[in-house]
Image (cartoon, helix red, strand yellow):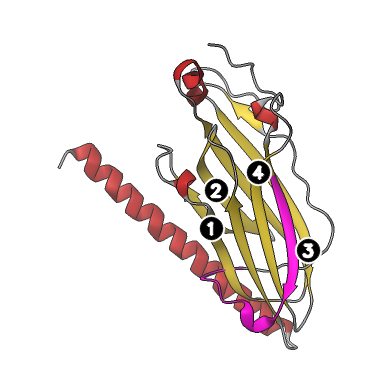
Amino acid sequence: MPVNLRLRKIEQRVQALKERAWQAKAHIAMIKEAVIGGGIGAQASITHENDMGSSFRLIKLVYALDGTQVFSKADDDAETLYKEKSFDIITGPIAPGSHTLSVLAVYRGHGYGVFKYLEKYTFTVRSSHTFTVTEGKATKVTATAFEKGKANTPLEKRPAIDFKVEQIEPEKVTSPTTAPGTPAPGSTTPPATTTPPATTPAPTTTTPAPGK
């Protein structure tokens, strides 16, 4: 087996172990919060839905709860991650009260023929949502990545994330992993920033107009 291929497989295994460690750490922290908080406690689940179109391929997804990273996946080659339409971020007990969920999603452009130049660009979207968890209740938070705007909307302004929070029966929160959620302040999704080819310095807030 070629050295490069062996190294890639090792990197993938290391990344998978890191992801499992983050999820385990987040789950333990949630249980600790619930125990220390006293009372009945609460349950919550967080799910990410990927509804982006074919022009965007997901290459990185990171979630943080109250400033602590709880989920991370990356696919620099844009070969597999974009095919997953749903991700179970985390599920379990959580302390009642206000919590903030932050999301970072990075996409690589994808196109055929005259649009193949899109593969040289990446699009980043950051979004956050603050919600309140009620003691003795179970909450489900669904974050959906979608394309906003119309056909004439610039690509760099299309990626967005919408948050939906709903209260469910406690015994129904059984997803593989997770975290909290109940209605609270609305979500905010700033315009995506675009990073041009590696040979050009990455802008901070604007996206260069792609050329053929």
x and y percent of residue 65 in the render? 66, 61
| Tag shown at residue 87 | 1
Can you say which quadrant of the picture contains the N terminus?
top left
Closer to the N terminus: mark 3 or mark 1?
1
Instruction: Check disc 2 and give the amino acid type.
Output: Leu
Instruction: Check disc 3 and give the amino acid type.
Output: Phe
**Is residue 64 shown above or below 170?**
above
x and y percent of residue 112 in the render? 46, 23
Instruction: Check disc 1 and give the amino acid type.
Output: Phe
Number of other residues with Cα within 10 Å of mark 4, as a class: few under 14, some 14 to 19, many 20 or more: some
Of tags 4 and 2, the one toward the viewer is 4
- Residue that mark 2 sits on: 61
Q: CA distance from mark 3 to mark 2?
A: 21 Å
**Is residue 20 shown above or below 192?**
below
- Residue that mark 4 sits on: 146
- Residue that mark 3 sits on: 131
Q: CA distance from mark 2 to mark 1?
A: 10 Å
